[in-house]
Image: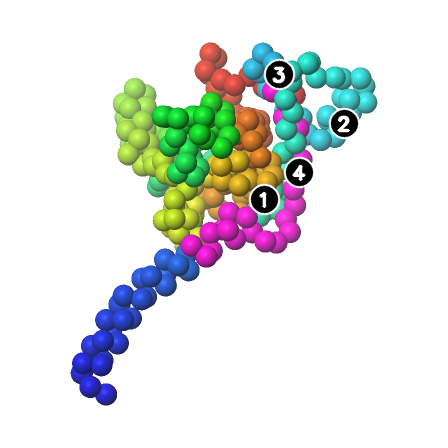
Amino acid sequence: MSRRFLAALVLAVLILAPIGYVLYGYSQYSASVNPDKPAPGHTYIVLRFPDGRYGVFTLPQYVNLTMQGFKPPEGTKGYAINVTGYITGIPEIDVNMTMNAPYQRFTIVIGDPSVKVCSSNPEEFTGSCSDRTAAVTEISALTATLFKRYYYFQALQNGMDDASAKQYAYEETMKRHDTRYLSFMTKVSLGLGRIGNEEHLAVVLLGPAEGADANRIIVPRPGLIVLEGKSDGALRAEVVLIEKIMQFEWPTGNQTTTQG
C-alpha cells in the first residue's frame, strides 16, 4: 500500500468522520424531541377567557364542571393539552424536575427560522406572530427566573449581601442564556444531546410553522422540554400550564392570571 494511498485514506476519514457525526445527530433529532415509545400522559384543559385571563383544569375537573352546567363565556378559546414525561413516568414530576434543576446554561429554541419574518412581515408567518411572541417572552422569562435562583443562593452562601447576590445572579443568567432558531445545526445539537441535557437546559417551541400536529408538552429526557402546539395560541397556553403545574406565581402586576 503506497504512502500516497494511505495519505488519501487518512484525509478521507478526517473529512468524512465529522460529516457523518453531524448527519447522525440530525437523524436523531426527531426521536430526541418526540420519542417513539409509549409513556404515561395526563390531559389538561386550558381556557383563555375574553379578558385575557387563563383557567387551567385537569380533564376530570373540567368534565365535572360541565356536568354541573359550567359554560365558558362567549369568545373563550379552549385547548386540550397532553403532558407526557419519559423520565419518572409521572408528567408533572418530570416538568418540575426539568425546570427546577440547576444548569450551567439554558437555550430557548423559539422555532423555525421563518419566525424571523415576525419582525418585518408578520403576515407572511405561518401562525400568529403575536401569540408566538407572547409564548417566547413568557417561557424565556420563566426559565430565566428559575435559572438564576441557583446563582442567587450560591452568591448568598459565598457571603454576598442580598442586592449583590441578585446582581450576580442576573449577570450569570444573562451570560449563560442563548436563543436559537430551529436550524439544521440546532437539530444536530439536540440529536447529539449537546443541548437538552443535565448541564444545558433546552426548551423547544414547535407550532404550526414547524408542522406541529398536536397540543402537548413532552419531557423526553433530563434537561429537555418540548412545547408543541397546533396553533401559537396553544403554545402560549402551554406556558401557562407549565406555570400551573409548577405552582409558579409571578410577582403582583407581572403575571399571567390563572384560575382553576
In percent of width and height, residue 61 lies at: 73, 26
In percent of width and height, residue 163 lies at: 30, 19
Describe the element under mark 2 as helix, strand or loop. helix
Residue 15 left/right relative to 247 = left
Question: Of marks 3 and 4, which one's residue comes earlier in the chain?
Answer: 4
Q: Is residue 197 above or below residue 59?
A: below
Question: Of marks 1 and 2, which one's residue comes earlier in the chain?
Answer: 2
Describe the element under mark 4 as helix, strand or loop. strand
Q: Which residues are magenta?
A: 26-49
Question: Of marks 3 and 1, which one's residue comes earlier in the chain?
Answer: 3
Q: Amino acid at mark 2?
A: Val
| Residue at the extreme bottom | 1
Question: Of marks 4 and 2, which one's residue comes earlier in the chain?
Answer: 4
Does the segment drawn in magenta span residue 17? no
Q: Residue at x 31, y 31 (%)?
A: 174
Q: Amino acid at mark 3?
A: Phe
- What is the C-alpha distance between the residues marked 1 and 2? 23 Å
Q: Amino acid at mark 4?
A: His
Residue topped by disc 1: 85
What's the mark number on residue 42? 4
Question: Of marks 3 and 2, which one's residue comes earlier in the chain?
Answer: 3
Does the segment drawn in magenta span residue 41? yes
Q: Give the quarter of the figure containing the N terminus.
A: bottom left
